[in-house]
Amino acid sequence: MYYLVILSTYFKFVYKPTPMTNKMLQFVDIGQQNPPKRDKSQRKEDFGEIYYEEAYHLSQSTNNMPEVCGRICPQDRLCEGNCVIEQSGHGTVTIGSIEKYLTDKAWENGWVKPIKVKIENEQSVGIIGAGPAGLACGEELRKKGYQVTIYDRYDRAGGLLIYGIPNFKLEKHVVERRIKLLKDGGINFINNFEVGKDSTLKELQSKHDAILISTGVYKPREVNLPGNDLGNIFPAMEFLTASNKKGLGDKVEMFDNGTLNAEGKDVVVIGGGDTAMDCVRTSVRQKAKSVKCLYRRDRENMPGSAREVGNAEEEGVEFIWLSNPKEFKGSNKVKSIIVDKMKLTDPDESGRRKPIVEENSEFEIKADLVIKSLGFDPEDLPILFQEPRLKVSQWGTIKADFDTLETSIPGVFSAGDIVRGASLVVWAIKDGRDAATSIESFLQSKQKMKVA
């Protein structure tokens, strides 16, 4: 306080401003002004500002299908869930919506162009499976000039993107325009082609310099319960495929005769993953009488997207937590399900709580359409492809080198769910891109040996 009094007295009686200090203090007399606005091209160059087209190309540079991932990935437990802004309490950056918006805008404005190869390479690659991993790998290799042929057992390319994911989550024209883009870029697609039936793996090898196996996993996991052989009990993929084919304008006999149509039925879906959410929400759109979802754990331990669960609840789906089917009842067709109530144990060494049956807790619910969504397992590819040299793990997934993704057969690589097990589209795309890098290195080495 003493020093403030002295300083105040000094400025009041002693300090005399000079012309220099007056000049230095003149800025306080100048009104507020804005700096002159520079031209957009100058600002873009000076500050590296990102505009829509550049933002799209940046997004596309690390993801072959950003418009797909933006629509279907569970961002709440991936990128958005790990957003540092979200963790600081300010709300996450909506990465999925941004991906979708940028890429849709790019398509609208003609910024998405087919691959233009500058120098063609005569070496060819055969890709088995036209799902996300195969499409991503094929695109990356085609950019390098390689001749790419993608074989698929179905009548349309796209894999689960076409037949497994409902139209309300992923519009089919989004996938179809991406396939057309790849075709326009020089990638050859052969549909309705089954390896093991139309050709063995060894025969395909003789046609190509390298092979990628990216078939995905489609074999449904089963639940062996009394009454499992009753009618109107279906795997999730059979139900979703019928619905998607109908949406694409195909004639689907089992849908048309009402077997795989949920309209007016009491539908029960067993399972708690994203595929189960697709089934319950599809049933709602087919005007089911009621839709219930049985899951043996509680809401906090459900593997599916929390966002999807919330969407399903808003649409009228009833979730029966801590419940597990015990028996299917009916004569020729299922009429009801006997269900056990479950409870969770204390966390085990993995940190997860195991569900166990509560004694004398069973109850019955009505059901005339049951959809089993218990996950997927690999098919027996060594038998299916007539190739005993192809080594698989104890779970049936293909054994592939962790770094190169090359299988037990030289020149044959594998990527996506058939290696890692049922997973997400974004992982399949990443695996496909990694496989493309390894295949290119293999082909370059092969070419050098040929020249030598």
Image (spheres, helix red, strand yellow):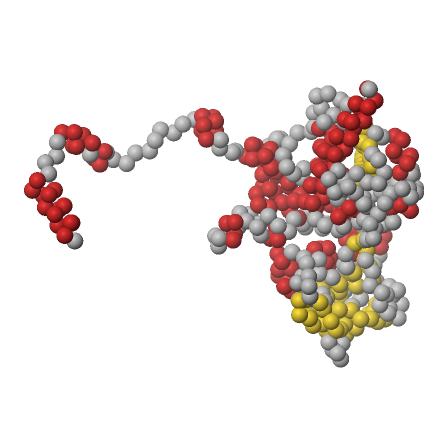
Image point (17%, 32%), residue name: 21
| 343 vs 324, nearest the viewer | 343
Asked where in the image residue 318 lies, by quadrant, the reply is bottom right
Which residue lies most toward the left here? 13
Q: Which quarter of the rendered picture does the C terminus lie within?
A: top right
- In the displayed structure image, the side of residue 350 where residue 149 appears, left or right: right
Compared to residue 404, the image places residue 255 above or below, namely: below
Q: Residue furthest bottom?
A: 360
Q: Residue at x 62, y 53 (%)?
A: 77
Q: Quadrant of residue 334?
A: bottom right
The foreground one among 8 and 197 is: 8
Residue 398 falls left or right of residue 282: right
Residue at horizontal 82%, vertical 40%? Answer: 407
Q: Residue at x 34, y 31 (%)?
A: 35
Residue 280 is situated, as x and y percent measured from the top left of the image, at 71, 59
Q: Is residue 185 above or below residue 266?
A: above
Residue 66, x across and y down, in percent: 64, 40
Q: How many marks?
A: 0
